[in-house]
Image (cartoon, coloured by chain):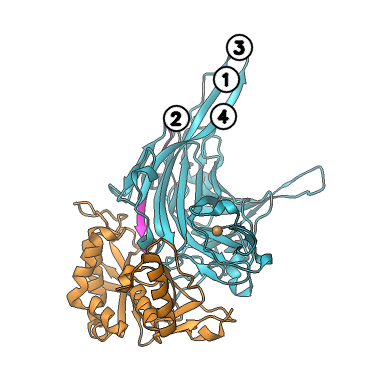
Amino acid sequence: MVTVRLPLLILSCAALVAGLTGAAHVPPAARASAAQAPSCGAPYRIERTLPGGAAWRLCWEMRTIEGLTLADVVYTPVGGAPISVLRSTALAQIHVPYDSGEPRFHDIGTLGENAVVLQEADCPGGERRERFVCVTVRPRGHAYLKPRPGEPNLSAQGSELVVYAAFEIGWYTYLVEWAFSDDGAITPRVGATGSLSGFTAAPEYGWPTKRGSTHVEQSHSHNVFWRLDFDVAGRGGDIVEQYDFTGSGTARRALGRKVLDKETAAVNRRTRWWRVADSETRNADGHRVSWEIGNSDSAEYRGPDDEAFTRADLYVSQYRDCERLATVNPAPDCAQSVDRYVNDERLTDPVVWVGVSYHHVARDEDADPMPTHWQGFRITPRDVTAENPR
Amino acid sequence: MGRGRTAAIAGAAALAGSLFLLGGGESPQAAGAPARSPLPGDPLTGEEITRAEQIASATLRAHMTSGRVEFLYVERDDDKAAADRRRADAYIYDYGANRLIVRTVDLGSGRVVAERAGKGVQAPPSRGEEARAAELLLADRRHGRAVRAAYAGAAGRALRSPAELGLRALIFSPRPKDRTARECASHRCVRLLVRLPDGTWLNTTRTVVDLSAKKILTLEW
Ligand SMILES: [Cu+2]
């Protein structure tokens, strides 16, 4: 019971994987070093070993348009070697359409100019970087719990490194947060707080707040998009797969795997998920290392024809440096929205765009200051280590 | 009138001052850049931002002074293909041609290495444009009166300058049914959110400021 095989990352030899992918081959040595050298220095570098021994390293930047942007995200499992996960991630849009049809906002302007100065109390137990970014560690409950006959329970409390900033966009304050867990999971999420807009509507488009029934606060959606440029196990070699489980109404459920080798706009299904795997790197069990994307918590807003970017929940596009925002993309000679980034092009360097909707029907409790409502998704390691990394 | 004022801000004389002011603690960008030479993934330093603006604007000085062309802001260039170099994207708007220009400056060589330009595409409004949108709104008889009245109600005294308002502008792109704002498909139009001293925001969602035509538009819905 005590003997635990340490999770050890094995860089597969070239011969083993040659021909599995069209992506350019990068020698293992070069890939390993890609995870070694952070591209940023203090105070933009975050390096934290969590209480259980896992570590995360990343760079942050407050960009003028996208606001808090994280780069060169590297995970080190307990007893394992560093492995890169993301080259960069940031918000790509917050689209806020109201239920009567108007108004409809695209809330990313110059987010970086709207960062809220965080007070000490806004960053509990953490460290503020240049006044706008909080870096802290918080507990995440049981990492595992297993009773053992005649022995104490085998259990541990997990923790996560959290990096966040707050942005004031009109009535709303948006908390933009990424949590990096000691088990290798990443949780990007956005919390909306501040104030309700106070926009009123006919009763069918809202909910009566304040005294009586004269003020009908208008319902609306917060459609948040993230851009994720993965770099699983070094630069290059990322492949995206979609998994489905057939057999609704039957006893059997068969796994279906589809390699997304071309740009794709995908919609959610209850058991559907995706993963970004490296075509060359395998764990000690000989399985491809990957990070899985689940997106089951979205309200799946679907808008009118002129908002085609709302018609899918996850997009995979070939990397293009001018494609930064999911809508109102501020780049000449470039497509304007994520649905237009997807043109059937062959994927050699995939960028993943995840959209998560939250339908906000106001309630009396939302009176000032409005309680935070959260939306996000999960990125979990799949076969990064050969065992529970503990 | 708004244009003239902004031209002065974007002009060579005021250029360094305005940016250093931001770098000194107001703007999250390069707020307290460390005293070392930046690594490739570090944010732009205040000095780099200033230099990128100067290099990107060099051939546009006359147009900037006349107010035809306006410098917006600088963003660190994040093209993976040039990840080892310090490069900056300067966002510039040509009001004369209603064209967005993005000039990529290589800070190592001190040269503009790429330019993308196009019509009908918009980058987020700059601080200067937010201020100008507020001036246009206040100069409009009906809207100006409403804003001043709301301000007086919240502050207990009259509005002295637009700087007393909290301003946040977002690009307004017309939807097919927005007939009154059809020109915003090619013009630079913004929605201006206005915060009063009591922390409340005015309902300005039907109001669009056409910065290109210097007009206030009211949406019909
Ligand atoms: Cu809401």
* Residue B121 placement: quadrant: bottom left
Which residue is label 2 attached to?
A52
Residues tagged 1 and 4 counted as in contact (Cβ below 8 A): no
Q: Residue at the spot x=53%, y=85% of the render? A: B180
Mark 4, residue position: A144
Q: Give, as a three-letter code, the residue at label 3.
A: Gly
The reply to whether dot 2 and dot 4 touch (C-beta < 8 Å) is no
Q: Ligand 1 shows up in which quadrant of the image?
A: bottom right
Within-10-Å neighbours for mark 3: few <14, some 14–19, many 20+: few
Going from N to C along the chain, the mark reached first, 3 or 4, is 4
In percent of width and height, residue A12 lies at 49, 41
Q: Pick whichever of labels 1 and 4 is earlier in the sequence.
A: 4
Is residue A57 among the parts visible in the rendering?
A: no
Where are the magenta residues, as a range? A51-64
Kindly identify which chain the residue marked by label 4 belongs to.
Answer: A
Q: How much space separates mark 2 and mark 4, taking CA atoms? A: 12 Å
Residue beneath disc 3? A150
**Residue behind mark 1:** A153
Whether labels 1 and 4 share one chain: yes
On the rendered structure, is A215 left or right of B181?
right
- Residue B175 seen in render: yes
Q: CA distance from mark 2 to mark 1?
A: 17 Å
Q: Is residue A60 magenta?
A: yes
Q: Give the structural element (helix, strand or loop) at label 3.
A: loop
Visual hue assigned to chain A = cyan
Q: CA distance from mark 1 to mark 4?
A: 10 Å
- The chain coloured orange carries which letter? B
Examine the residues drawn in magenta and state their main secondary structure.
Answer: strand
